[in-house]
Image: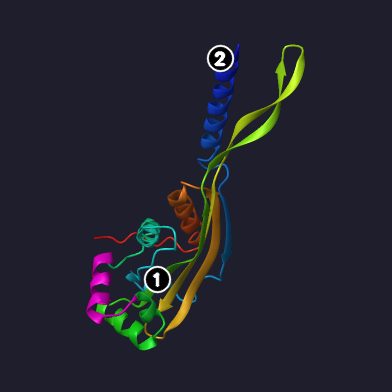
Amino acid sequence: MLNVRAKMIACFFCLTASGFLFLATGCFTSLAVDRSAPPVVALKDYQPIAILPSPDAPGFTGSGSLLLIVNQEVLKAKNFVLIPLQRAAQVLQDMHQTPQEVSGNAALLRRFGESLNSRIILLPAFLDYRTQKSYISSSTSQVWRGSSYEYQSLPTYHQGICEMRVTLKMLDSEKGVVVWRAEGKGRGPSGAEEKILRLLVEDLMKDLPLLPEKRE
């Protein structure tokens, strides 16, 4: 009898955990986006665009590179012309400057843009990142046994949660001013950070124009 009950409890736990993992693929993902006004310049006339690298968010290894790649992919899908990431990284290395130093100094920003022949510089960055891992704990539940109910301690699966806040800014490298900005927060199950980040960037860039395809 005890073996049967143990198997039933184990089966219940497995089904519960599987159900949570299934829901974690997207049902619990939420986005909150604060969009700015449309770009103050016609971006189609300011091609190509260069992207400044972003540092990793604390506790999210590789997030800077992931943010860079996701921004590149979303802009390419909108037919923006982009400076190769390797070229931008090489110019930064030759300048002996960090992305933060370049974006915060008008003279360095102008020099960076001129070196790449790029008027618009995109600066993506993490403003915040928090995560709580999934865990299992015991909880007391009422179960049917024979002709009556009794309370038993059963394993309970708790889905971890992660939150991230991202800002995107486009800077005019000649004038040193912001021509477009968007900021927002994504929240969802831990372990799905890449998906959450991709959905968030897509939503942040939702209002950017779809440019005509460039013909060779």
Q: Spatial distance from mark 1 to mark 2, Cα to Cα?
A: 61 Å
Residue under the point 47% across and 78% down? 178
- Residue bearing the label numbered 1: 122
Q: Is residue 94 left or right of residue 62?
A: left
Measuring from the top left, give residue 7's x and y in whole percent. 55, 18
Q: Is residue 39 visible?
A: no
The image shows residue 29 at horizontal and vertical percentages of 55, 48
First in sequence: mark 1 vs mark 2: 2
Examine the rendered structure and indicate whether residue 112 appears above or below residue 14: below
Residue pictured at 36% horizontal, 58% vertical: 62
Does 143 sit left or right of 25 as displayed? right
Is 149 included in the stretch rendered in magenta? no
Q: Is residue 100 above or below residue 154?
A: below
Work out which residue is located at the far bottom of the displayed protein and give it.
107
Q: Is residue 178 visible?
A: yes
Q: Which residue is mark 2?
A: 3
Q: Could you say whether the residue bearing mark 2 is in a helix, strand or loop?
A: helix
Q: Quadrant of residue 10?
A: top right
| Amino acid type at image mark 2 | Asn
At label 1, the amino acid type is Leu
At x 45%, y 49%, the residue is: 195
Q: Is residue 87 magenta?
A: yes
Q: Which residues are magenta?
A: 85-98
Verify CB contact (< 8 Å) between mark 1 and mark 2. no
Instruction: Name the mark on residue 7.
Output: none
User: What main secondary structure does the magenta stretch of the protein show?
Assistant: helix
Residue lying furthest right in this view?
148
Q: Nearer the viewer, mark 1 or mark 2?
A: 2
SS state under label 1: strand
Which quadrant is home to the N terminus?
top right
